[in-house]
Image (cartoon, rainbow, N blue to C red):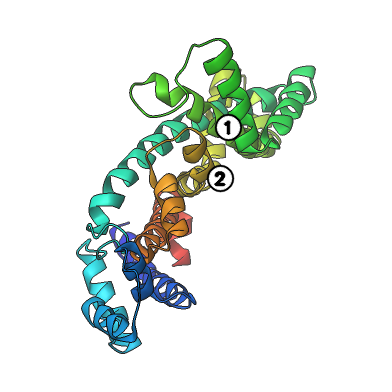
Amino acid sequence: MGSYIIKRILVSIPLLLIISFLTFVLINLSPLDPAEVVLHAQGVPKITDELMAQTKAELGLDKPFIIRYFDWLVACLQLDFGNSYVTGEPVWSLIGPAFLNTLKLTVVSSVVIIILSILLGVVCALREGTIIDQSVRGFSFFLATMPSYWLASLMIWYFAVKLDLLPTNGMDSYRSYILPVAVIAINYTGIYFRVVRNSMLNHLNEDYVLYARACGVPERKITIHILRNSLQVAISIFCMAIPIILGSTVVIENVFAWPGLGSLSVRSILSRDFPIIQAYVLILAAAFVLFNTLSDIINAAMNPKLRKGL
């Protein structure tokens, strides 16, 4: 198992390097000159060629492209993403707290989604074709198709404005998590519980289930065994759900004024703050690679046959 983990991590390193290079390339393809962004942020009334050349030299933009990339990559490995073009502050001092706030929202939402998905998936699989199964699937499909910003607005209007039960923005207490987590859970549970349901249904028709029932094994033990086998398939989906939620909180964070990565990324895009945008894209890409690797390792631990594939 140890050799598999090492091999899987080594495979991920070239992927991260490719992602970092593409991130750097795409940001540098912007038609807007970073030096011009810095000078505008500093409130320079008249931008001259001399000022542009001086600013480029200060930012290291006068160096060859490949040298700038390697300098940036080495700095990123030390969690030094440079300074904001707009505020001049270190990027990590801005993106670090925002990342932690988004991570808190993501972790709480993921736990709620996983619990609800497993519960609903098991109930619907064991009650296949009944009114419970059809109602849960129909209602979840209806809720999952709602735009998150519209659903969030409705929940703010009803629970925060009309009933005055919950705050509309910020993250002052545990009550601030309820509405954002509810919106995220509604959007994703309707998708992921179907994975558990379908996996359960596949295992319910396996020969070992028929044999266990013929031998008089209690239905509760059979259900637990089926669920354990079914989660081997669902675990990959759940692992990848975390970075997906991490990257899709932009709308929710802006609607609820949540001080996270989503809000910070929107402000950075509008102000053309390239260092923050680069760091944001790189962090999300690294999260996808990390959780994909983690998913493979967990699956290999649960199913030794998968280790032979690498």
**Whether residue 192 is situated above or below residue 33 in the rendered picture:** above
Name which residue lies at 48% across and 65% down: 309
Residue 202 placed where, x, y %?
A: 68, 39
Q: Give the crowd class for mark 2: few <14, some 14-19, many >=20 residues within 10 Å.
A: some
Residue 158 image position (x, y, % from top left): 60, 17
Instruction: From the top left corner, tell me how far across and down residue 157 is, in percent.
Output: 59, 20
Numbered disc 2: secondary structure = helix
The amino acid type found where label 1 is placed reads Ile
Helix, strand or loop at label 1? It is: helix
Task: Pick the residue in front: 183 or 197.
Answer: 183
For image coordinates 56% across by 30% down, the residue present is 183
89 vs 144: above or below: below
**Residue situated in front as seen by the camera: 237 or 156:** 156
Residue 11 placement, left or right of 159? left
Query: From mark 1 to mark 2, how far is it between C-alphas?
Result: 12 Å
Viewer-proximal residue among 172 and 230: 172
Locate residue 307, reporting x and y percent.
43, 60
Q: Answer yes or no: is residue 302 visible.
A: no
Residue in view at x 68 percent, y 38 percent: 198
Disc number at residue 226?
A: 1
Q: Earlier in the sequence, mark 1 or mark 2?
A: 1
Are dots 1 and 2 in contact, CB under 8 Å?
Answer: no
Q: Nearer the viewer, mark 1 or mark 2?
A: 2
Q: Which residue is at the far front?
A: 45
Residue placed under numbered mark 2 in the picture: 233
In the image, 99: left or right of 128? left
**Nearest the eye: 290 or 222:** 290
